[in-house]
Amino acid sequence: MSNQPDAPAEEADRPVPVRVRRAPKFARFIITGAALGVLLGFVVSAVTSVTPADGQVGGKTVTGYLAMIGLLLGGVLGAGLAVLADRSR
């Protein structure tokens, strides 16, 4: 058995060049998009004040549906933006 290290001491102290990959945080993009979508759903519901012709569906139900649609579309749009941000680098 020898007591020699695997690499010479001069090579071990030499800095190794590395490349840092900066990637976007996908969850943050999706959560932000979803939150903005819900906000937009509330705004659209408040501005349009849609009342159904038959009166069976209340305004809160319509607001909830618009908020959920905004949540889904905002999340998908946020994910798409994260993919685009990741590909551009």
Image (cartoon, rainbow, N blue to C red):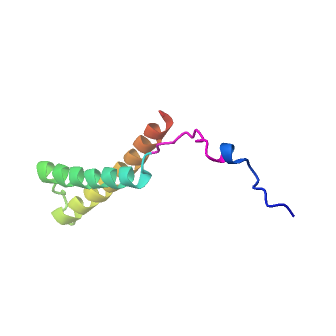
Task: Depth check: give the residue in front, 61 or 68.
Answer: 68
Instruction: State the extent of the magenta-drawn residues as a range.
Output: 12-23
Instruction: List x then y, in percent, for residue 43.
Output: 16, 51
Q: Is residue 1 magenta?
A: no
Task: Depth check: give the residue in front, 10 or 40.
Answer: 10
Q: Quadrant of residue 67?
A: bottom left
Q: Residue at x 57, y 40 (%)?
A: 18
Note whether residue 45 is visible: yes
Note whether residue 58 is visible: no
Instruction: List x then y, in percent, for residue 2.
Output: 84, 60
| Position of the N terminus by quadrant | bottom right
Q: Total of numbered circles in the picture?
A: 0
Rendered view: 77 above or below 67: above
Task: Depth check: give the residue in front, 82 or 34.
Answer: 82
Q: Is residue 14 magenta?
A: yes
Q: Residue at x 18, y 56 (%)?
A: 53
Instruction: List x then y, in percent, for residue 70.
Output: 30, 52
Instruction: List x then y, in percent, for residue 81.
Output: 40, 41
Q: Quadrant of residue 5?
A: bottom right
Task: Depth check: give the residue in front, 73 or 50.
Answer: 73
